[in-house]
Image (cartoon, rainbow, N blue to C red):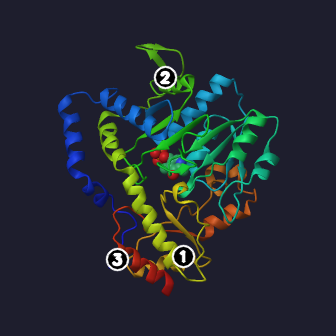
Amino acid sequence: MQVPFLSLKDVTEKYKDEIHEAAFRVIDSGWYLQGNENKKFEEDYARYIGTKYCVGVANGLQALELMIRACKILYGWNDGDEIIVQANTYIATILAISQNSLTPVLLDPNAETLELDVDSIEKAITSKTRGVMLVHLYGRCLYNEKIDEICKNHGLRLFEDNAQAHGCMYKGKKTGSFGTVAAHSFYPGKNLGAFGDAGAITTDDKEIADLVRVLGNYGSSKKYVFDYVGENSRLDEMNAAVLDVKLKHLDKDNSRRKQIAKMYYEGIKNPLIKMPTVKSDESNVFHVFPVFCEKRDELQQYLKEHEIGTLIHYPIPPHKQKCYKEWNEISLPVTEKIHATELSLPMSPCLTDEQVKWVIDCVNEF
Ligand SMILES: *Cc1c(COP(=O)(O)O)cnc(C)c1O
């Protein structure tokens, strides 16, 4: 039996008629940027996340970069000011900080929960700290009240990278609504994925929302008048229309992911395989299903021989990348271990129970 890591063809097939209808509506409208589709998706997504504002942008990296840049401008931060962030994340989170000439202060997460320990955040705060960035990696919520409290006590801004956690909840509120501002990616493989690159920010702060929109529109709030050195980062009408269709089905798709995860948690019984601690049902939307194995590469090869697709998220942590030579010598043992042992099993709302059982059987036989 073949089990692909993720088949986007199957994901699209599920809602094909509605998607075609939306796509043809945009094609026939003759209006492809900054129109009603974008406006409607922004309203619907803000309502879904539970924030006052949503601004569509071109991709997740620019959502991160522009939300930080807006804060840097509005709050008068200086080059070299610091943002505390977990070291085990996708490179985009770190790029967005360093592209703003701010310094990411990299922290190891807790090895069991993969969450940031409040003590380690507190210890990392200096006179230059301006914010804390939470990355809801793998679809797991990283927010808790203690982190909020630390930020408030120290006058820090809380940022969320919600690229992997659309629909994730904590105590009845969605991730993407906890901090000052949050960034979302709609890269095709995400839980809510577009047909190409797309992203958004969500916030309750009108000044930030307005400034992100201006910065992503060449720095212009009035046609041909430029107040900032901006960039071109807009969500196009076609992707906005498609995302609006898929948003309606997101909760249903996330519930299927949770069912599959439950099967994995209950079925996988192999002492060589470790799974992260279970979180409450609502606070994990399983963007991927990570397992940890000392013989990770052999496990991946073994599963490949059984026609099971897997991916590593991610093989090299940001601080060990060539682009960040200056941090290559920093020691972050938990992060390094995660990157050396992580393997993501197949996860998508389109997997059948039979496919999931086959993955479980093969993992247990390894
Ligand atoms: C996908 C992702 C991004 C970047 O999003 P793009 O739309 O690909 O630019 C940022 N952070 C995390 C955690 C991601 O998974």
- On the picture, is 41 further left or further right than 31? right
Q: Name the residue that disc number 1 marks.
A: 297
Q: Amino acid at mark 1?
A: Asp
* Cα–Cα gap, marks 2 and 1: 46 Å
Q: Label 1: state its secondary structure.
A: helix
| CA neighbours of label 2 inside 10 A, class few (<14), some (14 to 19), many (20+) | many
Q: Label 2: state its secondary structure.
A: helix
* Disc number placed over residue 214 in the picture, else none: 2
The mark tally for this picture is 3
Mark 2 or mark 1: which comes first in sequence?
2
Q: Amino acid at mark 3?
A: Glu
Would the CB of label 2 be found within 8 Å of ligand 1? Answer: no
Asked if one can make out residue 69 in the rendered structure from this viewpoint, the answer is yes
The quarter of the displayed image where residue 21 is located: top left
Residue 183 percent location from the top left of the image:
53, 40
Quarter that holds the N terminus: bottom left
Q: Amino acid at mark 2?
A: Val
User: Residue at left 73%, top 59%?
Assistant: 332
- On the picture, is 312 further left or further right than 79? left
User: Residue at left 68%, top 24%?
Assistant: 75
Q: Label 3: state its secondary structure.
A: helix
Would the CB of label 3 be found within 8 Å of ligand 1? Answer: no
Q: Name the residue that disc number 3 marks.
A: 354
Would the CB of label 1 be found within 8 Å of ligand 1? Answer: no
2 or 3: mark nearer the eye? 3
User: Residue at left 56%, top 33%?
Assistant: 67
